[in-house]
Amino acid sequence: MKFFSLNQNSPAVDFKQALLAGLAPDGGLYFPESFPQFSQEEISGLKNNSLAEAGFKVLSKWLEGEMSSSEIKEIADKALNFPIPLKKVGDFFILELFHGPTMAFKDIAARSLALLMSRVLQKENKKAVILVATSGDTGGAVAHGFANVPNIKVAVLYPKGKVSRLQEEQLTRVSENVFSIEVDGVFDDCQALVKKAFVDSELKNLNLSSANSISVGRLIPQIIYYAYAYGQMPADKLEFVVPCGNFGNVCAGIFARKMGLPFNKFLVATNENDEVYKYYQTGVFQAQQTVQTLSTAMDIGNPSNFARILKVFENNHAAFKELINVMKVSDLETIAAIKKVYTEHSYLLDPHTAVAWVAAENEKNDFTKIITSTASPIKFADSIKEHTGIEVDDSRAIAELVKNPKRKTEIKNNYAELKSTLLSLSI
């Protein structure tokens, strides 16, 4: 399996090279030269698989010839050892992806990525520094996924005042190989700083790699939960409803479909950060300034993975619209949905899943809709209480975290300051 840079100025590499590099040397995202295919028999064989079984089958397709089956199975069994229930709520199915250690869907990919990278680095007797930007959930999942993993240290950039209290505790109270850096800016600033560091030759000795979904090693494991969900459902007329920020979540679903899984549609749900909604309407993509909303992890004005999605469709707007519908949801609609679903179904949505719920309700068709629920409402207890009056008890989760010492460095939105910080951390 070979991967090429979307910037077209770097040589193609194998999975291990793409995994360790994160970004290509020319600053481009890696993209597969071809998609491994599930046969009809293999697709039928996904029925009623466990998450680990589905994970083994997906990863085997991408890692064939690079890792043994026993190695892949060990990684899948260790990384995917928690449930992702598929629950019927009202007219929709909700795929609860938040039952991992940091209560967010990122656990599935981050834990898989950590084990993949550690295995490769130990084999090659190398060390690496994971540099990652987060709008909330990625950083916590990466920090915990890589905690105490041999041969790896982690630096996580997050935007000051733009993450929830529980998210910040998860970012800053981990292990000694994890360094949290609070940036006085928004997520897009953090992401831009990370991308700049990757192409800085003066940081070459750090062996920087990525755990954002800019990394194919993070993106490919996200295919797993689409394969798993497909195996739990009747095969006809499935539509995934996906709340999107950096667009790795829906990109993985599109990759799953390119592998042969017969999904009919994707409904992308965005908040006021509506640059992809505007692309859906006009065929023109234009990055924009980030707008702060209640669904903070989706507050991204220049989503990295959208470049991969455009490549899938070869920039054909009509082909994009044939598979993907995009809807924009306001904070007021988000709040109303949390209240309504809690009252009518005794089910509490987090603000991101609520955005997807609104989109699902507003789209009128006869597809069976599966909402990918990205985070536990516990992670947004203060915000939910403030805007809906619904009490959410996050005290137990926070009490567990505060047993660990807090490690945090504060910097301005300034690359020189980030570079100095990275070099001073002795990582």
Image: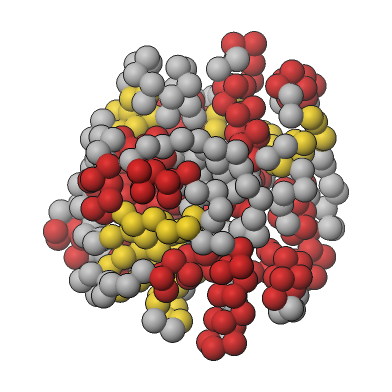
Choose top left, top right, bottom left or bottom right for residue 46: bottom left
Measuring 56% from the left and 69% from the top, which residue is drawn there? 333
Residue 269 placement (x, y as % from top left): 45, 58
Measuring 14% from the left and 59% from the top, which residue is drawn there? 40
Q: In which quarter of the image is the N terminus?
A: top left
Tell me if residue 131 can be seen: no
Q: Which of 199 and 413 is in front in this view?
A: 413
Residue 308 placement (x, y as % from top left): 37, 37
- Side (left or right) of 425 relative to 267: right
Q: Give the residue furthest to the top.
A: 202
Measuring 71% from the left and 42% from the top, which residue is drawn there? 159
Q: Nearer the viewer, residue 268 or 70?
A: 268
Choose top left, top right, bottom left or bottom right for residue 415: top right
- Side (left or right) of 116 relative to 376: left
Tell me if residue 283 can be seen: yes
Q: In which quarter of the image is the C terminus?
A: top right
